[in-house]
Image (tube, helix red, strand yellow):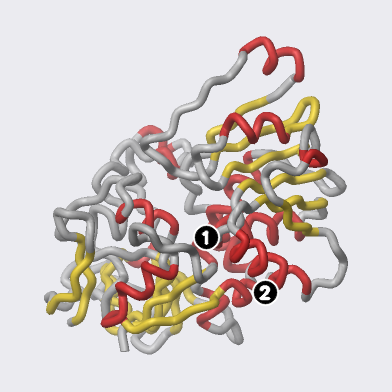
Amino acid sequence: MKALILNERRTVSLVDHPKPEASAPTDVVVRVVQTGICGTDRSVLVGKFPAEPGVVMGHEAVGFVDAVGSAVTAHKPGDRVIINPTLYCGNCPSCLRGHWDFCANKAGTEVGLDLDGAFAEFIRLPERFVHTLPEGMDFDRAVVVEPLACALNNIEAGRLEAGETAVIVGGGPVGVVCAMAARHYGARVLLIEPDPYRQELCRKVFAQDGDGRVTVHTPDEAELARRGDVVVDTVGSLLEPSLEYAAARGRVVIMGYNSKASATVRPLEILQRGLQIIGAGDYNSRLFPKAIELARWLPLERLVTHRFPLERHEEAFAALAAAPGTPYSALKVVLVPE
């Protein structure tokens, strides 16, 4: 099968790769229809996130069941499905307490980073990580469900309530999905994005709602200071300005992954302003069915601006500024095997 693998030099190559088989009783093999390029994928290529050379990248996938193991009961060939790439063992102390997102055995099990992922024609996962799509939900909406699960994890970690103001730092795909989720929860949303092209894309996404509850801003606007009851740093390297955006007793959630990020905080200011800094971690897989259900009501397909075949992967990543010296020219990019 065709697949995109990660090279030692943090580039990807299109190769002929063995097709996965349903070799274990609980295996499900999915024929991939399309896979979203995640900010994590981009971070791997620009050196901000680790991954194993030789792995098939990609994890935001939807498709059709191709084959199932002998013990699989929830799926059959031909079913329309979405994969949940956040694996857990189910047996460690954290998992037994229901904290699947902090599985002690999670290291080395990240789909598309450690285990072969979905920038390919087929992917194999255990049955419990494959979910049936609701009838009528198209693949362009469904391919953004996994980012929605990430967004819900962070919005809920911030305990956002209706009537509050949410400041979302970063207008990439996950920032836009966070803004959609916060709006759905009844919040007023200030979405911050420095890139002019992405600002315009964000405005187009929310202009269709017509209620003005999500507005797009540049980072240096004076009106942003001390506004957010909940502030979500979707970039992962903007904790210091995020604290400035927080209102008294504000909750600042660190969402973005950046292994090179650091920050300086002033403990006395945190104390006096009653601020909370929250690390939400990865999403708990218990949230994934909730994200699928919520996707029925959110126009997630608005995010998908570009679609490329695997053969044009260099163009796809360049559109997300993953190549040196290239600006953003897309919001959400999906790769299609054929």
Q: CA distance from mark 2 to mark 1?
A: 13 Å
Residue 279 in view in this figure: yes
> Depth check: 73 or 77 in front?
77
Upstream in sequence: badge 2 or badge 1: 1
Q: Residue furthest top?
A: 268
Name the quadrant of the N terminus.
Answer: bottom left
Q: Label 1 neighbourhood size at 10 Å, few (<14), some (14-19), many (20+)?
A: many
Measured as percent of width and height from the top left, residue 119 is found at 30, 72
Q: Label 2 neighbourhood size at 10 Å, few (<14), some (14-19), many (20+)?
A: some
Residue 319 shows which numbered tag? none
Which residue in the structure is indicated by mark 2?
299
The residue located at (37%, 40%) in the rendering is 103
Measured as percent of width and height from the top left, residue 112 is found at 29, 60
Q: In the picture shown, does residue 321 fall above or below 228? A: below
Apparent side of residue 227 relative to residue 258 in the rendered image (left or right): right
Residue 74 in view in this figure: no
Which residue in the structure is indicated by mark 1?
147
Image label count = 2
Measured as percent of width and height from the top left, residue 130 is found at 40, 69
> Depth check: 125 or 2 in front?
2
The residue located at (22%, 61%) in the rendering is 11
- Give the SS element for disc 2: loop
Q: Residue furthest front?
A: 325
